[in-house]
Amino acid sequence: MKRVTGIGGIFFKAKEPEALRAWYQKHLGVDVQVWGGAAFNWADEQGEPVGGSTIWSIFAADSDKFSPGGASFMVNYRVENLHGLIAALREEGCEVLDETEDSEFGKFGWVIDPEGNKVELWEPPPGQ
């Protein structure tokens, strides 16, 4: 079974998220959307879309999105079989959170790494 197949997103906290989003937009050209982040669409060597994206988003410093992890960031990894991977991680003794989420955006699950960081696992919906 394949495990991680790519990075689906990078999320981090900021003391002043609106100001930081504006800085990234102005100085680095990040196309920040009203929901607080940007989607970087994947392309091949010729610049043609290949059906995937990496999400980038800033959260408020007091957000509990990364709980129970203690870090100010969270990485979202793409996986092919979320439930199979979660079962394997549990069997290997990893700290896997009980909660999973199924939505129009795909399937999500979480594991805590040995340093206490919350890691998001994401199985994209079919076709992505």
Image: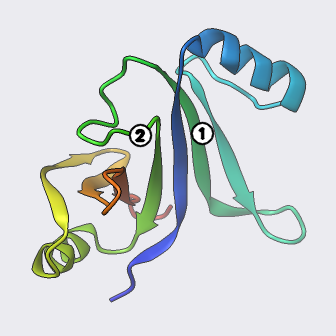
Disc 2 element = loop
Q: What residue type is labelled 1?
A: Trp
Q: In this view, does 94 lie above or below 2?
A: above
Instruction: Tell whether 47 sits left or right of 4.
Output: right
Disc 1 element = strand
Q: What residue type is labelled 2?
A: Ala
Q: Position of residue 41 (x, y in %)?
A: 69, 51
Q: In which quarter of the image is residue 23?
A: top right
Instruction: Tell whether 91 sits left or right of 34.
Output: left
Cα separation between marks 2 and 1? 16 Å
Neighbours of disc 1 within 10 Å: few (<14), some (14-19), many (20+)? many
Q: Which mark is residue 71?
A: 2
2 or 1: mark nearer the eye: 2
* Residue appearing at x 17%, y 62% in the figure: 95
Q: Is residue 119 above or below residue 31?
A: below
Residue closest to the eye, 48 or 24:
24
* Residue appearing at x 39%, y 85% in the figure: 2
Q: Is residue 68 above or below residue 47?
A: above
Q: What colour scheme was applied to this rendering of the protein? A: rainbow
Quarter of the image where the N terminus is located: bottom left
Q: In this view, does 68 lie above or below 77?
A: above
Q: Which mark is residue 56?
A: 1
* Residue appearing at x 27%, y 68% in the figure: 82
